[in-house]
Amino acid sequence: DGLVSNYVNTVASLVAAGYAVVAPDLEGQGAEAQRNGTPQPYYNLASSGRAVAAGILAAHKAVTGLSPNWASVGHSEGGHAVLALESTAGDASAYSYKGAVAIAPFNSIEASVSLMDAVAAADPVNLVGYRTLQQMFVGMMATALATQQPSFQPSQIMGADLLALMPSFKTQCIFKVFGMVGQDVATKTPAAYKGYSAQWAADAAMKAFLQANDAAVLNGFRVTKPTLVLQGTADPLVFESLQTPLVVRWQTAGMPITYKTFSGADHSTIMTQGSSDMLAFLSTILR
């Protein structure tokens, strides 16, 4: 349970440092959402912003004496969300947002899917794993788009094998879906598996969705609050080779982003290896 343990440890370190931690369910998550059949949007910046803002408002309503200052910390898809909170969490504008820590933020989706072809070719022993991740990424984006635009048909960007698994993306934990997709991919050769289309991201609706939600290609994306981005060099899900030039591009554009990589850290261990940097950064922007 590496991810679960690291999340628990990260929250514990924040509490030990004296911070109040607000961790709201995102839309489509949590027991109430499951009972009501609320869909999980996935990768939707506006949805994430609403959820975080609601959490901040609820925390101040429930607990007296909280500081009006707040900052955000997110990992993976959460890291992707916190990068845009200053423009998406407007409902919490009564309180002063000071900045963000984005840990292995899940950006550059189209580029990541493409890069995995080369990564898989160089690491044939783990071919099934990389093919599974490619199907997962496209399946998540298709689910996200179909939730936002019900008229979108995932069959526009994928074949029958991946399409048959799409209902699971709406109802199951993403880790369980990963296992299901992996088992499915392993039953056929890569050439025989009818998964995502090579031109999946060129679909007009999908292209517009990514341009509205992926910070790597988001039109007009800008960070004005102090932001720390932490990235592991051995992350097989969020590639350092894509993250570094992206952050450098933002820094060159004048965005107040601090960036640090950790040699050998993967998508899970980056949370523990970057913990001290996270705490030091927060102490600076929240003091």
Image (spheres, helix red, strand yellow):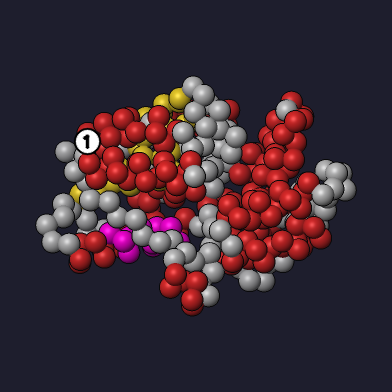
Magenta region, residue range: 47-56
Looking at the image, which residue is at 64% across and 39% down?
111
Looking at the image, how many numbered discs can be counted on the residues? 1
Q: Is residue 53 magenta?
A: yes
Q: Residue furthest top?
A: 263
Q: Residue at x 69, y 62 (%)?
A: 166
Q: Residue at x 65, y 63 (%)?
A: 168
Front position in the image: 11 or 254: 11
Q: Vertical placement of 118 versus 135: above or below? A: above
Toward the left, the furthest residue is 65
Q: Give the quadrant of residue 167.
A: bottom right
Q: Position of residue 249 (x, y in %)?
A: 49, 30
Q: Is residue 4 magenta?
A: no
Which of the 4 image quarters holds residue 250?
top left
- Picture coordinates of residue 158, whole percent (x, y): 77, 56
Residue 183 image offset from top left, x and y in percent: 74, 51
Would you call the spot at circle 1 few (<14 residues within 10 Å), some (14-19), or many (20 or more)? few
Mark 1: secondary structure: helix
Position of residue 137 relative to residue 268, above or below, is below
Q: Which residue is mark 1?
A: 283
For the C terminus, give its image quadrant.
top left
In the rendered structure, the answer to whether residue 67 lies left or right of residue 274 reads: left
Q: Main secondary structure of the magenta part?
A: helix
**Residue kind at label 1, given as amino acid type:** Ser
Residue 45, horizontal then vertical, whole percent: 47, 55
